[in-house]
Amino acid sequence: MTHAIRMKEFGGPEVLEFVEVELGDPGPGQARVAHTAIGVNYIDTHIRSGMYPVQLPSGLGGEAAGTIVSVGEGVDHVAPGDRVAYPMSAPPQSYSEECVMDAKGIVKLPDNVDDETAAAMMLKGLTSWYLLKRTYEVQPGDWILLYAAAGGVGTIATQWAKHLGARVIGVVSTEEKRELALAHGCEEVFLSNSDIVTGVRELTNGEGVAVVYDPVGKDTLTTSLDCLRTRGLFVSFGNASGPVDCLPMLELAKRGSLYATRPVLPNHIATREDLEWGSGELMKVVGEGHVKIEIGQRFALKDAADAHRALEGRQTRSSTILLP
Ligand code: NDP
Protein backbone atom coordinates (compact mmCIF):
# COMPACT_ATOMS: atom_id res chain seq x y z
CA MET A 1 0.00 0.00 0.00
CA THR A 2 1.08 3.54 -0.74
CA HIS A 3 -0.58 6.96 -0.42
CA ALA A 4 -1.77 9.42 -3.05
CA ILE A 5 -3.97 12.45 -3.59
CA ARG A 6 -7.14 11.42 -5.41
CA MET A 7 -10.28 13.29 -6.46
CA LYS A 8 -13.73 11.81 -7.10
CA GLU A 9 -15.21 15.05 -8.44
CA PHE A 10 -14.11 18.39 -9.86
CA GLY A 11 -14.24 21.43 -7.61
CA GLY A 12 -12.29 23.53 -5.12
CA PRO A 13 -9.20 22.39 -3.18
CA GLU A 14 -11.47 20.45 -0.79
CA VAL A 15 -12.00 17.71 -3.41
CA LEU A 16 -8.38 16.60 -2.94
CA GLU A 17 -8.25 13.57 -0.65
CA PHE A 18 -5.14 11.85 0.74
CA VAL A 19 -5.90 8.12 0.52
CA GLU A 20 -4.29 4.67 0.48
CA VAL A 21 -3.86 3.18 -2.99
CA GLU A 22 -2.68 -0.15 -4.35
CA LEU A 23 -0.05 0.04 -7.10
CA GLY A 24 0.60 -2.76 -9.55
CA ASP A 25 3.98 -3.74 -10.98
CA PRO A 26 5.13 -1.79 -14.02
CA GLY A 27 3.97 -3.28 -17.33
CA PRO A 28 5.92 -3.21 -20.61
CA GLY A 29 7.41 0.25 -21.18
CA GLN A 30 6.55 1.43 -17.66
CA ALA A 31 8.53 2.30 -14.54
CA ARG A 32 7.66 2.53 -10.86
CA VAL A 33 8.99 5.70 -9.25
CA ALA A 34 9.24 6.45 -5.50
CA HIS A 35 8.86 10.21 -5.23
CA THR A 36 11.10 12.38 -3.09
CA ALA A 37 9.66 15.76 -4.19
CA ILE A 38 6.62 16.73 -6.28
CA GLY A 39 6.07 19.88 -8.34
CA VAL A 40 2.88 21.94 -7.94
CA ASN A 41 1.74 23.75 -11.09
CA TYR A 42 -1.07 26.12 -11.89
CA ILE A 43 -2.34 23.67 -14.49
CA ASP A 44 -3.08 21.24 -11.61
CA THR A 45 -5.69 23.71 -10.34
CA HIS A 46 -7.35 23.75 -13.78
CA ILE A 47 -7.50 19.93 -13.84
CA ARG A 48 -8.88 19.90 -10.29
CA SER A 49 -11.57 22.47 -11.14
CA GLY A 50 -12.63 20.64 -14.30
CA MET A 51 -11.53 23.39 -16.71
CA TYR A 52 -9.19 20.75 -18.22
CA PRO A 53 -11.36 17.66 -17.65
CA VAL A 54 -9.91 14.20 -16.96
CA GLN A 55 -11.65 10.92 -16.30
CA LEU A 56 -12.78 10.57 -12.65
CA PRO A 57 -11.82 9.32 -10.15
CA SER A 58 -8.36 10.66 -10.84
CA GLY A 59 -4.99 11.38 -9.35
CA LEU A 60 -3.44 14.80 -9.82
CA GLY A 61 -0.08 16.32 -10.73
CA GLY A 62 2.27 15.91 -13.67
CA GLU A 63 5.72 16.64 -12.29
CA ALA A 64 8.00 14.95 -9.73
CA ALA A 65 11.47 13.68 -8.89
CA GLY A 66 12.43 10.45 -7.18
CA THR A 67 14.09 7.06 -7.52
CA ILE A 68 13.29 4.20 -9.86
CA VAL A 69 11.93 1.21 -7.88
CA SER A 70 11.41 -1.21 -10.78
CA VAL A 71 10.97 -1.20 -14.53
CA GLY A 72 8.85 -3.21 -16.96
CA GLU A 73 9.88 -5.10 -20.05
CA GLY A 74 11.66 -3.09 -22.74
CA VAL A 75 12.79 -0.22 -20.50
CA ASP A 76 16.54 0.30 -20.72
CA HIS A 77 17.15 4.05 -20.34
CA VAL A 78 16.49 3.95 -16.58
CA ALA A 79 17.12 1.23 -13.97
CA PRO A 80 16.25 0.58 -10.30
CA GLY A 81 18.11 3.00 -8.03
CA ASP A 82 18.45 5.77 -10.66
CA ARG A 83 17.60 9.31 -9.55
CA VAL A 84 15.05 10.60 -12.05
CA ALA A 85 12.45 13.28 -12.77
CA TYR A 86 9.60 13.91 -15.18
CA PRO A 87 7.57 16.97 -16.25
CA MET A 88 4.16 15.53 -17.07
CA SER A 89 2.74 12.12 -16.35
CA ALA A 90 -0.37 11.08 -18.25
CA PRO A 91 -2.80 10.52 -16.62
CA PRO A 92 -1.99 13.01 -13.85
CA GLN A 93 -0.67 11.15 -10.79
CA SER A 94 2.51 12.74 -9.41
CA TYR A 95 0.76 13.87 -6.17
CA SER A 96 1.61 10.48 -4.67
CA GLU A 97 4.29 8.63 -2.72
CA GLU A 98 4.88 6.30 -5.66
CA CYS A 99 3.50 5.92 -9.16
CA VAL A 100 3.69 3.59 -12.16
CA MET A 101 4.01 5.50 -15.42
CA ASP A 102 5.19 5.45 -19.02
CA ALA A 103 8.98 5.36 -18.75
CA LYS A 104 9.38 7.42 -21.95
CA GLY A 105 8.46 10.54 -19.98
CA ILE A 106 11.26 10.05 -17.43
CA VAL A 107 14.82 11.43 -17.54
CA LYS A 108 17.84 10.68 -15.34
CA LEU A 109 19.11 13.47 -13.10
CA PRO A 110 22.72 14.63 -13.17
CA ASP A 111 24.58 14.79 -9.82
CA ASN A 112 24.48 18.60 -9.79
CA VAL A 113 20.65 18.77 -9.80
CA ASP A 114 19.09 17.67 -6.49
CA ASP A 115 15.64 16.13 -6.25
CA GLU A 116 13.81 19.16 -4.86
CA THR A 117 15.29 21.40 -7.55
CA ALA A 118 14.26 18.90 -10.23
CA ALA A 119 10.69 18.71 -8.94
CA ALA A 120 10.53 22.50 -8.91
CA MET A 121 11.81 22.97 -12.44
CA MET A 122 10.90 20.19 -14.88
CA LEU A 123 7.49 21.41 -16.05
CA LYS A 124 8.14 25.12 -15.43
CA GLY A 125 11.64 24.96 -16.91
CA LEU A 126 10.59 23.07 -20.03
CA THR A 127 7.75 25.54 -20.46
CA SER A 128 10.25 28.40 -20.23
CA TRP A 129 12.48 26.59 -22.73
CA TYR A 130 9.82 26.12 -25.37
CA LEU A 131 8.40 29.63 -24.89
CA LEU A 132 11.79 31.32 -25.27
CA LYS A 133 13.38 29.02 -27.81
CA ARG A 134 10.63 27.47 -29.89
CA THR A 135 7.39 29.47 -29.71
CA TYR A 136 9.50 32.57 -30.34
CA GLU A 137 13.28 32.49 -30.62
CA VAL A 138 14.27 35.28 -28.26
CA GLN A 139 17.07 37.44 -29.69
CA PRO A 140 19.70 39.48 -27.83
CA GLY A 141 18.35 42.98 -27.29
CA ASP A 142 14.68 41.99 -27.64
CA TRP A 143 12.26 43.60 -25.23
CA ILE A 144 9.78 41.02 -23.90
CA LEU A 145 6.80 41.36 -21.58
CA LEU A 146 6.09 38.59 -19.05
CA TYR A 147 3.22 38.44 -16.56
CA ALA A 148 3.40 36.62 -13.20
CA ALA A 149 7.14 37.34 -13.26
CA ALA A 150 7.57 36.35 -9.60
CA GLY A 151 5.87 32.97 -10.07
CA GLY A 152 7.21 29.51 -10.89
CA VAL A 153 7.45 29.86 -14.67
CA GLY A 154 8.04 33.61 -14.30
CA THR A 155 11.25 33.46 -12.22
CA ILE A 156 12.73 30.73 -14.43
CA ALA A 157 11.75 32.35 -17.75
CA THR A 158 13.05 35.77 -16.64
CA GLN A 159 16.50 34.43 -15.80
CA TRP A 160 16.66 32.33 -18.96
CA ALA A 161 15.53 35.21 -21.20
CA LYS A 162 18.17 37.46 -19.62
CA HIS A 163 20.79 34.79 -20.23
CA LEU A 164 19.74 34.83 -23.90
CA GLY A 165 20.32 38.60 -23.97
CA ALA A 166 16.69 39.75 -23.86
CA ARG A 167 15.39 42.64 -21.75
CA VAL A 168 12.45 41.46 -19.64
CA ILE A 169 9.61 43.69 -18.47
CA GLY A 170 7.70 41.91 -15.72
CA VAL A 171 4.17 42.35 -14.39
CA VAL A 172 3.24 41.31 -10.82
CA SER A 173 0.51 42.11 -8.29
CA THR A 174 2.46 43.33 -5.23
CA GLU A 175 5.53 45.39 -4.27
CA GLU A 176 7.09 42.35 -2.62
CA LYS A 177 6.74 40.34 -5.84
CA ARG A 178 8.13 43.33 -7.76
CA GLU A 179 11.35 43.17 -5.71
CA LEU A 180 11.56 39.44 -6.32
CA ALA A 181 11.11 39.81 -10.08
CA LEU A 182 13.75 42.57 -10.24
CA ALA A 183 16.12 40.34 -8.27
CA HIS A 184 15.62 37.60 -10.90
CA GLY A 185 16.73 39.90 -13.71
CA CYS A 186 13.77 41.96 -14.96
CA GLU A 187 14.80 45.37 -16.33
CA GLU A 188 11.55 46.87 -15.08
CA VAL A 189 8.49 45.48 -13.31
CA PHE A 190 5.01 47.01 -13.38
CA LEU A 191 2.25 46.35 -10.91
CA SER A 192 -0.79 44.76 -12.53
CA ASN A 193 -3.03 47.71 -11.55
CA SER A 194 -0.72 50.32 -13.14
CA ASP A 195 -0.71 51.77 -16.68
CA ILE A 196 1.35 48.97 -18.22
CA VAL A 197 0.88 50.07 -21.84
CA THR A 198 2.27 53.58 -21.25
CA GLY A 199 5.13 52.17 -19.18
CA VAL A 200 6.06 49.66 -21.89
CA ARG A 201 5.88 52.29 -24.67
CA GLU A 202 8.15 54.62 -22.67
CA LEU A 203 10.73 51.92 -22.04
CA THR A 204 10.80 50.80 -25.67
CA ASN A 205 10.94 54.29 -27.27
CA GLY A 206 7.35 53.96 -28.38
CA GLU A 207 8.01 50.80 -30.34
CA GLY A 208 6.52 48.10 -28.10
CA VAL A 209 7.85 44.64 -27.24
CA ALA A 210 8.76 41.83 -29.62
CA VAL A 211 6.74 39.25 -27.71
CA VAL A 212 4.26 39.14 -24.84
CA TYR A 213 4.12 35.98 -22.71
CA ASP A 214 0.69 36.09 -21.08
CA PRO A 215 -0.39 33.33 -18.65
CA VAL A 216 -3.19 35.44 -17.14
CA GLY A 217 -5.68 35.19 -20.02
CA LYS A 218 -9.02 36.96 -19.96
CA ASP A 219 -8.10 40.01 -17.84
CA THR A 220 -4.93 40.98 -19.73
CA LEU A 221 -5.77 40.35 -23.39
CA THR A 222 -6.17 43.99 -24.49
CA THR A 223 -3.16 45.23 -22.51
CA SER A 224 -1.03 42.47 -23.99
CA LEU A 225 -1.98 43.32 -27.57
CA ASP A 226 -1.45 47.05 -26.93
CA CYS A 227 2.12 46.44 -25.72
CA LEU A 228 3.33 44.70 -28.90
CA ARG A 229 5.47 46.20 -31.65
CA THR A 230 4.45 45.93 -35.31
CA ARG A 231 4.41 42.25 -36.30
CA GLY A 232 5.01 41.28 -32.66
CA LEU A 233 3.90 37.94 -31.21
CA PHE A 234 1.18 37.46 -28.59
CA VAL A 235 1.76 34.22 -26.68
CA SER A 236 -1.28 33.38 -24.57
CA PHE A 237 -0.07 30.42 -22.50
CA GLY A 238 -2.40 30.32 -19.50
CA ASN A 239 -5.77 31.17 -17.98
CA ALA A 240 -5.10 32.26 -14.38
CA SER A 241 -7.92 34.85 -14.66
CA GLY A 242 -10.05 32.74 -17.01
CA PRO A 243 -9.60 31.69 -20.65
CA VAL A 244 -9.43 34.05 -23.63
CA ASP A 245 -12.46 32.88 -25.57
CA CYS A 246 -12.56 35.50 -28.30
CA LEU A 247 -9.76 37.22 -30.21
CA PRO A 248 -11.09 39.01 -33.32
CA MET A 249 -8.54 38.88 -36.16
CA LEU A 250 -9.06 42.58 -36.90
CA GLU A 251 -7.64 43.41 -33.45
CA LEU A 252 -4.37 41.88 -34.66
CA ALA A 253 -4.54 43.82 -37.94
CA LYS A 254 -5.17 47.22 -36.45
CA ARG A 255 -2.28 46.95 -33.96
CA GLY A 256 0.28 46.17 -36.70
CA SER A 257 -0.20 42.73 -38.30
CA LEU A 258 0.37 40.95 -34.99
CA TYR A 259 0.79 37.19 -34.62
CA ALA A 260 -0.92 35.16 -31.89
CA THR A 261 -0.50 31.62 -30.57
CA ARG A 262 -1.92 29.53 -27.71
CA PRO A 263 0.81 26.94 -27.03
CA VAL A 264 0.74 23.99 -24.60
CA LEU A 265 3.64 21.93 -23.32
CA PRO A 266 2.55 18.53 -24.72
CA ASN A 267 2.79 19.89 -28.29
CA HIS A 268 6.31 21.17 -27.72
CA ILE A 269 7.51 18.15 -25.72
CA ALA A 270 5.74 15.73 -28.06
CA THR A 271 8.49 13.13 -28.50
CA ARG A 272 11.29 11.52 -26.52
CA GLU A 273 13.73 13.61 -28.61
CA ASP A 274 11.95 16.84 -27.56
CA LEU A 275 12.13 15.77 -23.90
CA GLU A 276 15.84 14.94 -24.08
CA TRP A 277 16.63 18.12 -26.03
CA GLY A 278 14.66 20.44 -23.76
CA SER A 279 15.66 18.84 -20.47
CA GLY A 280 19.30 18.71 -21.60
CA GLU A 281 19.24 22.48 -22.22
CA LEU A 282 17.39 23.06 -18.94
CA MET A 283 19.90 20.99 -16.90
CA LYS A 284 22.72 22.90 -18.62
CA VAL A 285 21.49 26.43 -17.80
CA VAL A 286 20.68 25.34 -14.24
CA GLY A 287 23.96 23.40 -13.83
CA GLU A 288 26.00 26.38 -15.07
CA GLY A 289 24.17 28.71 -12.68
CA HIS A 290 22.52 30.92 -15.35
CA VAL A 291 19.09 29.94 -14.03
CA LYS A 292 18.65 29.43 -10.28
CA ILE A 293 15.64 27.43 -9.18
CA GLU A 294 14.05 28.93 -6.11
CA ILE A 295 11.56 27.00 -4.00
CA GLY A 296 9.28 29.57 -2.39
CA GLN A 297 7.22 27.12 -0.34
CA ARG A 298 7.04 23.46 0.61
CA PHE A 299 3.90 21.57 1.74
CA ALA A 300 3.41 18.00 2.93
CA LEU A 301 1.86 15.84 0.20
CA LYS A 302 -1.24 15.30 2.35
CA ASP A 303 -1.69 19.11 2.45
CA ALA A 304 -1.89 19.50 -1.34
CA ALA A 305 -5.21 21.36 -0.91
CA ASP A 306 -3.40 24.08 1.09
CA ALA A 307 -0.82 24.40 -1.69
CA HIS A 308 -3.66 24.96 -4.17
CA ARG A 309 -5.28 27.57 -1.93
CA ALA A 310 -2.00 29.47 -1.73
CA LEU A 311 -1.36 29.24 -5.49
CA GLU A 312 -4.86 30.35 -6.50
CA GLY A 313 -4.82 33.05 -3.81
CA ARG A 314 -1.64 34.55 -5.41
CA GLN A 315 0.18 33.92 -2.11
CA THR A 316 3.09 31.91 -3.55
CA ARG A 317 6.43 33.05 -4.92
CA SER A 318 8.71 31.13 -7.30
CA SER A 319 8.13 27.33 -7.34
CA THR A 320 6.04 25.24 -4.94
CA ILE A 321 6.73 21.60 -4.06
CA LEU A 322 5.03 18.84 -2.07
CA LEU A 323 7.03 16.46 0.11
CA PRO A 324 5.77 12.87 0.48
P1 NDP B 1 2.62 30.80 -10.81
O1 NDP B 1 3.61 30.44 -9.75
O2 NDP B 1 3.04 31.80 -11.84
O3 NDP B 1 1.29 31.27 -10.10
C1 NDP B 1 0.30 31.91 -10.84
C2 NDP B 1 0.44 33.44 -10.80
O4 NDP B 1 -0.44 34.01 -11.76
C3 NDP B 1 0.03 34.07 -9.49
O5 NDP B 1 1.04 34.03 -8.51
C4 NDP B 1 -0.29 35.49 -9.92
O6 NDP B 1 0.89 36.31 -9.90
C5 NDP B 1 -0.70 35.35 -11.40
N1 NDP B 1 -2.10 35.69 -11.59
C6 NDP B 1 -2.54 36.66 -12.42
N2 NDP B 1 -3.87 36.73 -12.39
C7 NDP B 1 -4.29 35.80 -11.52
C8 NDP B 1 -5.57 35.42 -11.06
N3 NDP B 1 -6.69 36.03 -11.49
N4 NDP B 1 -5.64 34.42 -10.16
C9 NDP B 1 -4.54 33.80 -9.72
N5 NDP B 1 -3.28 34.13 -10.14
C10 NDP B 1 -3.17 35.14 -11.02
O7 NDP B 1 2.12 29.47 -11.53
P2 NDP B 1 2.92 28.50 -12.54
O8 NDP B 1 4.34 28.91 -12.62
O9 NDP B 1 2.59 27.10 -12.19
O10 NDP B 1 2.20 28.80 -13.93
C11 NDP B 1 2.19 30.10 -14.48
C12 NDP B 1 1.20 30.18 -15.60
O11 NDP B 1 1.69 29.47 -16.73
C13 NDP B 1 -0.19 29.58 -15.29
O12 NDP B 1 -1.18 30.36 -15.89
C14 NDP B 1 -0.11 28.22 -15.96
O13 NDP B 1 -1.36 27.68 -16.28
C15 NDP B 1 0.72 28.56 -17.18
N6 NDP B 1 1.40 27.41 -17.76
C16 NDP B 1 1.15 27.09 -19.06
C17 NDP B 1 1.81 26.06 -19.67
C18 NDP B 1 1.60 25.78 -21.11
O14 NDP B 1 2.27 24.92 -21.69
N7 NDP B 1 0.68 26.47 -21.77
C19 NDP B 1 2.73 25.20 -18.91
C20 NDP B 1 2.97 25.66 -17.56
C21 NDP B 1 2.30 26.72 -17.01
P3 NDP B 1 0.68 37.88 -9.54
O15 NDP B 1 0.01 37.89 -8.20
O16 NDP B 1 2.05 38.45 -9.54
O17 NDP B 1 -0.18 38.44 -10.65
Image: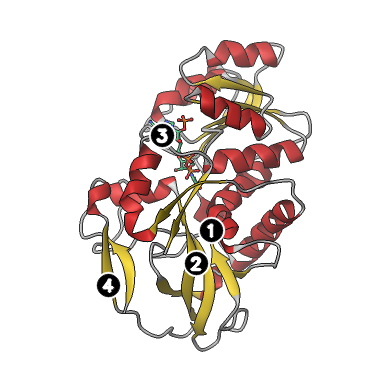
Crowdedness near tag 2: few (<14), some (14–19) or many (≥20) residues, C-alpha within 10 Å:
many
Three-letter amino acid code of the residue under disc 4: Glu
Please name whichever residue, 89 or 312, is drawn nearer the observer in this view of the structure: 312
Disc 2 on helix, strand or loop?
A: strand
Give the number of the mark in front: 2 or 3.
Answer: 2
Q: Tell me which corner region of the image, top left, top right, bottom left or bottom right, holds residue 27.
A: bottom left
- Residue, disc 4: 20
Q: Which mark is residue 314?
A: 3
Q: Which percent across, then down, holds residue 33?
A: 48, 75
Answer with left or right where residue 159 lies relative to residue 193.
right
Q: Earlier in the sequence, mark 2 or mark 1?
A: 2
Residue 119, labelled with which disc?
1
Q: Amino acid at mark 1?
A: Ala
Whether tag 2 and tag 1 are in contact, CB under 8 A, the answer is yes
Above or below residue 277? Residue 259 is above
Rounded to the nearest whole Å, what is the CA distance between mark 2 and mark 1? 9 Å
Q: Rounded to the nearest whole Å, what is the CA distance between mark 3 and mark 1?
A: 20 Å
